[in-house]
Amino acid sequence: MNKSFLILALVLLGFPTLKAQVEYSPVTTSTPFLMIVPDSRGGAMGDIGVATSPDANSIFYNPAKLAFASHQFNVGINYVPWLRNITNDVFVSNLMLTNRLDEKSAWGVNLKYFSYGKIDTNNGEFDPSGDLISTGIEKPYEMAISGAYALKLSENFSMGVGMRYIHSDIAIRVDDSPIKKVNTVSVDVSGYFQSDEKNFGEFNGRYRGGFNISNIGPKVSLYDGGEDSFIPTNLRLGGGFDFILDDMNTITANVEFNKLLVPTPPIRDRKDLDGDGDRDEILEGKDDNVGFISGMFQSFGDAPGGFSEELKEFTWAVGTEYMYDHTLAIRAGYFNEHDLKGARKYFTLGAGFKFKNSTIDFSYLINSSAINNPLDNTLRFSLSLDFGDIYEDF
C-alpha cells in the first residue's frame, strides 16, 4: 500500500496506531482533529487547560477564561508535527486571537488547520521504466474556524459561548471514491472560576475550576451510503490550585477529566429467538442510532459493561507548573486513558520563557503505552504575544 494512503488511514481510524495486540473498544467519532491540543503549554502538562490561568489558547480549552485574560490582546501561533516517525509533511497549525473588551467581557477567534500532506495518486499503470504513472497530487485537509465570547457574571466567575465552522476535505479524487466533503457547525458552552488570593499561613493560594462542553453539533456523513457519524462532543472538567510562595515563585497543581459525550457502540448479535427461522438483532448496551442531543445524555449510561465501563470512558490527567518571576516556567504532566478505551498513556515535559510581551513554550511527550502515539519523540513549540492594556485579575 502507498505510504501516503497508510498515513491517511491511520488518521481516519483514530490517530493512535496499534503496537501490540490489545482488545479494546474505544468510542470513535468523525473529525477527531478537533480534539488535538494546539499548544505547548497545555501539552507540557498532560494536555490540560480547562482550569489553568488564561492565555492565548484559552479559546480551545475553555472560552470562559477569556474574560480573565491578563492583557487586552493575545495572539497565539502553534505548529504541531504529526506522525513525525512516519512522515514529515503531516501537521496541525493554529492561529488564535483574543481581545478583552473591558473588565467583564472578551472575545476570541481561532483558525485550526490539519494538513494530511501530499498524496501522489495513480491508477495502477506503469511506465516503460517500471514506475507507477502519477495521475495527480492530492492535498487532503481539515479545518475549523471558531469564535467565542466570554462574560464575567461575578468578580470570580465567568461563562463563555462559542461557535465553530468545521470543514473536512479528505476525499481522494479517484474513480468511485466513497469519501465525502463535510461542512457543519458546532457550539461550546463553558464556565470558569478563579478565587481571590488568600493566605494559608506560610504561603498564599488561589483556587481555579472550569468546565467546557465543546463541539455540540449534528452528526455528519463521511461516506456515500454510510451511516452518519458523531462529531467529538466532549466534556472537559478540571480544577487547580496556585501555591504562591512569594512574589517570585509560584507552583500550580492541576487535575482534569475528559469524556466524549458520544454513545458507546453496542455489541450487536443476531439469533433466532422465536423459532421462526429469522435471526433477530440483539443489542448488548443501547442503540447508538440516535440524534446528537439524545446521544449526549445517553453517553452517561449506555456502555455494554454497565457503570464500571462508563467510568473507564473518562480520561484523566495531572499537570504542574513552576513559575519564576513570571518569566521562566517549568512544567510536567501525565495523561491516562483506560486500556479498554484506547490505552493512551504518556508523560509530558516542557518549559516556557517570557521576553517582554512575547512567550515561547515547548513540550515533549514520552509515551508509556503499548499504543503508538503520533507525538512520540516530537518537540513542539508555541509562540504567544501579549499587548495592549493590562488587567489585574491575578
Image (cartoon, rainbow, N blue to C red):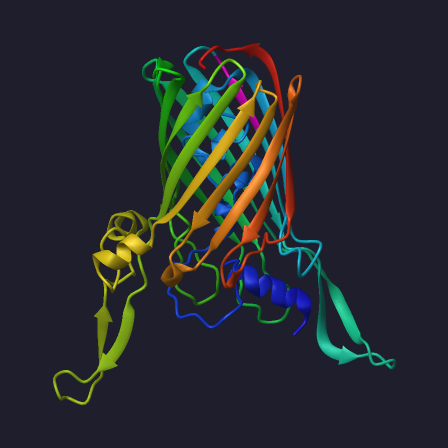
Task: Kindly tell me whether residue 212 is visible in this rendering.
Answer: yes
Residue 100: in magenta span: yes
Give the residue drawn at x 43%, y 16%: 105
- State left or right for residue 156 relative to residue 169: left
Front residue of 372/126: it is 372
Residue at the extreme right? 129
Q: Quadrant of the C terminus?
A: top left
Majority secondary structure in the magenta region = strand
Front residue of 150/170: it is 150
Task: Kindly tell me whether residue 46 is visible in this rendering.
Answer: no
Residue 40 coordinates in the image, percent (x, y): 58, 38
* Vertical order, 311 against 304 (above or below): above
Residue 77 coordinates in the image, percent (x, y): 63, 33
Residue 155 coordinates in the image, percent (x, y): 35, 13
Quadrant of residue 325 in the image? Answer: top right
- State left or right for residue 60 relative to residue 287: right
Residue 69 coordinates in the image, percent (x, y): 49, 19
* Vertical order, 385 against 154 (above or below): below
- State left or right for residue 6 relative to residue 289: right
Front residue of 101/64: it is 64
Q: Quadrant of the N terminus?
A: bottom right
Quadrant of residue 257 in the image? Answer: top left
* Vertical order, 133 against 293 (above or below): below
Q: Which residues are magenta?
A: 97-101
